Image: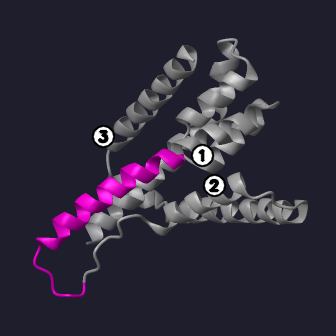
Amino acid sequence: SDAEEEDVVIAVALVVIFGTIMIPTIPFLGALAGLAPETMGMWAGGSIHEVAQVVAAGGAIGGSALEIAVVVKLARVLLLAPVVFILGLVKRRQSSGVQTTGQEKRPPIVPLFIIGFLSMVLLRSTVDLTEPVLATGDFLQTILLATAMFALGCGVKIQSLLHVGVRPFVLAFASTGIVATIAFVGIELV
């Protein structure tokens, strides 16, 4: 329905907004706390919402923070696979009991992007790839990441955000703060 689609657009917009705010915030707070660049990289990867935002924050921190931030973020993405699998099974089970017109599609058990991501992790972990293949992959990664961020930005409707009220912003702020706090406590315990 249109209301559900608008809710998704608003949620994506808030993720983009608060993730973008975290790009300068993590390096600033990390420097204020006297954290090493590697520790700030772990914090960025563990707390920032989108991969491209993590790359931006890791690059802003400098040193080896970028590589560490990306590895931590990709580990978080990898951990989504079992969660998405379980949620996919639950959603399919729920939709199988609902009367349909035959036109609705059942959700996939695991979305294709998860399968693609896991395939690339397996390929890179087990095959010694040549430098031209890695350079091509790096180029494609940059183009696809920029395209994804552009598409996310295009999905943001400022008009919709102006009409949702303050509650979704408070929730997004609180959620971002909770995730950043959990990530910070986690890196401090390591």
Q: Nearer the viewer, mark 2 or mark 1?
A: 2
- Secondary structure of the residue carrying numbered label 1: helix
Magenta stretch: helix, strand or loop mostly:
helix
Q: Which residues are magenta?
A: 77-103
Residue bearing mark 2? 121
Near-viewer residue (85 or 2): 85
Which x, y percent locates residue 6? 34, 63
**In the rendering, at what x and y percent does residue 27 appear?**
68, 27
Q: Earlier in the sequence, mark 3 or mark 2?
A: 2
Question: Which label number is shown at residue 74?
Answer: 1
Q: CA distance from mark 3 to mark 1?
A: 30 Å
Q: Mark 2 belongs to which amino acid?
A: Val
Asked if residue 48 shows in the view, the reply is yes
Mark number displayed over residue 167: 3
Question: Can you say which quadrant of the picture contains the C terminus?
Answer: top right
What residue do we see at 30% from left, 40% from top? Answer: 167
Q: Residues within 10 Å of mark 1 (few under 14, many from 20)?
A: some
- Residue at the spot 57% in from the left edge and 42% down from the top edge: 75
